Image: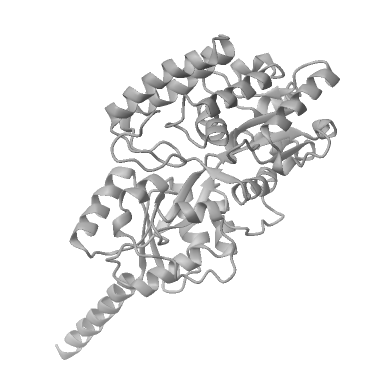
């Protein structure tokens, strides 16, 4: 009997120690890396090296919010660190710890992204974690036709128009390509690149004189755009066939061109307009709840996630790119090696102007996107007067923002109530 109690006692102690070890792990509650393959890579390749251990638990948005809100309302819980998109993190801004004191030991993070992580305050409420984005790509044959003195990593839209014009004249056919097909992401270009670069706005200055100037530029560019662009969804395909020499698209829709013919293509940042170099990141960040059970461990994990080797491991696990200047290893896929530096150059540029994905629209997001698509079709394809189209579409946009009761998001200034459309 004594021997039995001794065995049971030993087992009880072992269970207690095991439970303590599990509870010592930092619970990483995330909306990202949810596919099984990505989850496994995050656990085995990204987080396994963290001293103390990490319990990485990716969730769909519904369960993610349910547990997060319950713990935030209670003021305590088991979540040690949160990983989510900017829009999700901004919803709970009052509940995050200031991360300004985390020692990044000389790691350079995109200043534009750091500013986003302040969520309109003086505190660093989240740190940028990883990003996807849109970039430009060119066949290397096109580089000899660049305007004199142009820097491909710091182009302006006027230089892009001049470049496209020269290409068309010298090669005998339009060589600029744009994803204007039914499944193309053209609306993201107008929301995140064109209007921010010219008007410093996505919504409020939709019908401004500055926005009109942007559409005028794009109308000029369209003269030198391959007319088959109205059928294009993925620009990697016309780049590979040679029908297009210069193009804009999401990085995932350019990757095959670089992977199949890495010697033929170069990636570079989107151009800049009068207000800056507008770009639309899909930005994920990491935050720490004020009620985290082990604050020191949570902050240590935040620092770990920002290290260059962790950033590169995250890229390999998720195909999201670093938000730092982490050097990329030579054995990366060709597309990652080519596109990564272009993203870094764009997001770290002095004139970088991030324009966030729409926030707060709910199921009206599709109608919001349609406003920009309709504007493109009426102005560029239909040849209708720019001021008239912008005025009419602004009325539709204004009604939509009121219906959604969606406040402004960057680059527009914060608003009380629906984002105004001037």
Relative image position of residue 69 (x, y in whole percent): 24, 53
Compare residues 258 and 141 and report the one nearer the observer: 141
Corner quadrant of residue 70: bottom left
Q: Where is 151 relative to 422, above or below?
A: below
Residue 243 shows in the view: yes
Q: Position of residue 174 (x, y in %)?
A: 75, 18
Residue at image location 72% in from the left, 36% down from the top: 260
In this rendering, position of residue 10 left or right of residue 144: left
Quadrant where the C terminus sits is top left
Image point (45%, 50%), residue name: 284
The relative height of residue 339 versus residue 292 in the rendered view (above or below) is: above
As drawn, the residue found furthest toward the left would be 1
Q: Quadrant of the N terminus?
A: bottom left
Of the pair 5 and 23, the residue shown nearer to us: 23
Please state the total of marks drawn on the protein image: 0
- The relative height of residue 141 versus residue 387 in the rendered view (above or below) is below
Extreme-bottom residue of the structure: 2
């Amino acid at each position: 009997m004594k021997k039995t109690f001794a065995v049971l006692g030993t087992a009880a102690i072992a269970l207690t120690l095991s439970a303590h070890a599990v509870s010592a792990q930092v619970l990483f509650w995330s909306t990202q890396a949810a596919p099984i393959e990505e989850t496994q890579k995050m656990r085995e390749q990204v987080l396994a090296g963290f001293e103390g251990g990490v319990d990485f638990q990716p969730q769909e948005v519904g369960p993610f919010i349910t547990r997060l809100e319950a713990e935030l309302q209670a003021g305590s819980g088991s979540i040690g660190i949160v990983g989510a998109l900017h829009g999700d993190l901004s919803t709970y801004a009052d509940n995050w710890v200031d991360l300004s004191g985390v020692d990044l030991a000389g790691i350079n993070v995109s200043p534009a992204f750091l500013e986003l992580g302040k969520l309109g305050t003086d505190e660093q409420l989240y740190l940028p974690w990883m990003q996807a984005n849109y970039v430009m790509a060119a066949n290397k044959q096109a580089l000899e036709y660049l305007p004199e003195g142009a820097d491909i990593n710091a182009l302006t839209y006027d230089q892009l128009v001049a470049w496209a014009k020269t290409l068309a004249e010298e090669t005998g056919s339009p060589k600029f390509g744009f994803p204007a097909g039914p499944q193309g992401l053209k609306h993201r270009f107008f929301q995140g690149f064109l209007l921010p670069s010219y008007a410093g706005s996505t919504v409020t200055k939709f019908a401004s004189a500055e926005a009109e100037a942007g559409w005028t530029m794009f109308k000029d560019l369209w003269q030198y755009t391959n007319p088959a662009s109205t059928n294009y969804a993925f620009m990697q395909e016309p780049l590979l066939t040679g029908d297009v020499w210069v193009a804009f698209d999401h990085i995932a829709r350019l990757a095959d061109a670089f992977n199949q013919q890495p010697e033929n293509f170069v990636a570079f940042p989107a151009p800049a307009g009068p207000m800056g170099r507008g770009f639309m990141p899909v930005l994920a960040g990491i935050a720490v709840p004020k009620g985290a059970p082990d604050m020191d461990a949570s902050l240590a994990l935040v620092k770990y996630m920002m290290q260059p080797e962790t950033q590169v491991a995250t890229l390999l696990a998720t195909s999201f790119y670093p938000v730092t200047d982490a050097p990329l290893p030579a054995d990366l896929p060709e597309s990652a090696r080519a596109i990564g530096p272009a993203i870094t150059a764009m997001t770290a540029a002095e004139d970088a102007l991030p324009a966030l994905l729409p926030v707060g629209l709910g199921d009206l997001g599709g109608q919001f996107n349609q406003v920009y698509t309709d504007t493109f079709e009426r102005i560029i394809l239909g040849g209708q007067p720019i001021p008239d189209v912008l005025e009419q579409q602004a009325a539709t946009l204004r009604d939509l923002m009121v219906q959604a009761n969606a406040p402004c998001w960057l680059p527009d200034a914060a608003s009380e109530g629906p984002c105004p459309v001037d």
